[in-house]
Amino acid sequence: MSSSNTKTVFTKLAPAPVGPYSQAVIAGEWLYCSGQIPLDPSSGLLIGNGNIETETKQVISNLKAVLNAAGAKPSQVVKTTIYLVDLSDFEKVNLIYAETFLNDKSPARACVQVAALPKGARVEIDCIAWLG
């Protein structure tokens, strides 16, 4: 696919990337959203002080902002990946995740434990959405 078929997405309503990547890329009718961690969009600082519920709510808020900037809704998400520093947080994250993504067309999902996440976050979520 040539670069003319792709478009980067950026919104100030989600945190600026912390590295050399885009918040999301539209490729044809697909939207690939980079992982979001619980950064406050205005300050760029990690929020939650280690509280997994607060962190997860911010991650979902950031992800929704990126989806919205691309003209998409959570109901168009077809795949997510959740990265947790501690799998014992799975149930708490799952409850908050379900508020946005549990519906008659819930996306496919993977959830993995990782050794660490950027900026000391405890949770990160990325997704793929269908724009067609």
Image: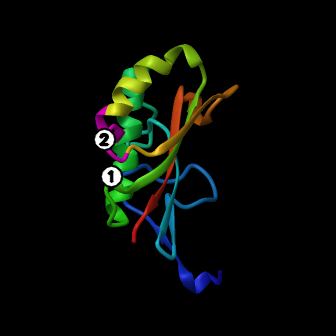
Q: Examine the structure image and report whether residue 75 is included in the region drawn in magenta.
A: no
Crowding at label 1, few (<14), some or many (≥20) Cα neighbours within 10 Å? some
Furthest residue to the right? 115
Q: Examine the structure image and report whether residue 100 is included in the region drawn in magenta.
A: yes
Furthest residue to the front? 104
Instruction: Mark 2 and mark 1 in contact? Answer it, CB < 8 Å.
Output: yes
Percent position (x, y) of residue 31? 48, 64
Q: Is residue 105 left or right of residue 22?
A: left
Residue depicted at 34% across the width and 62% down the height = 72
User: Camera-side residue: 77 or 54?
Assistant: 77
> Over which residues does the magenta segment extend?
99-105
Residue 75 marker:
1
Residue depicted at 43% across the width and 25% down the height = 93
| Residue assigned mark 2 | 103
What amino acid type is highlighted by mark number 1? Ser
User: Camera-side residue: 98 or 39?
Assistant: 98
What sort of colour scheme is used for the picture?
Answer: rainbow
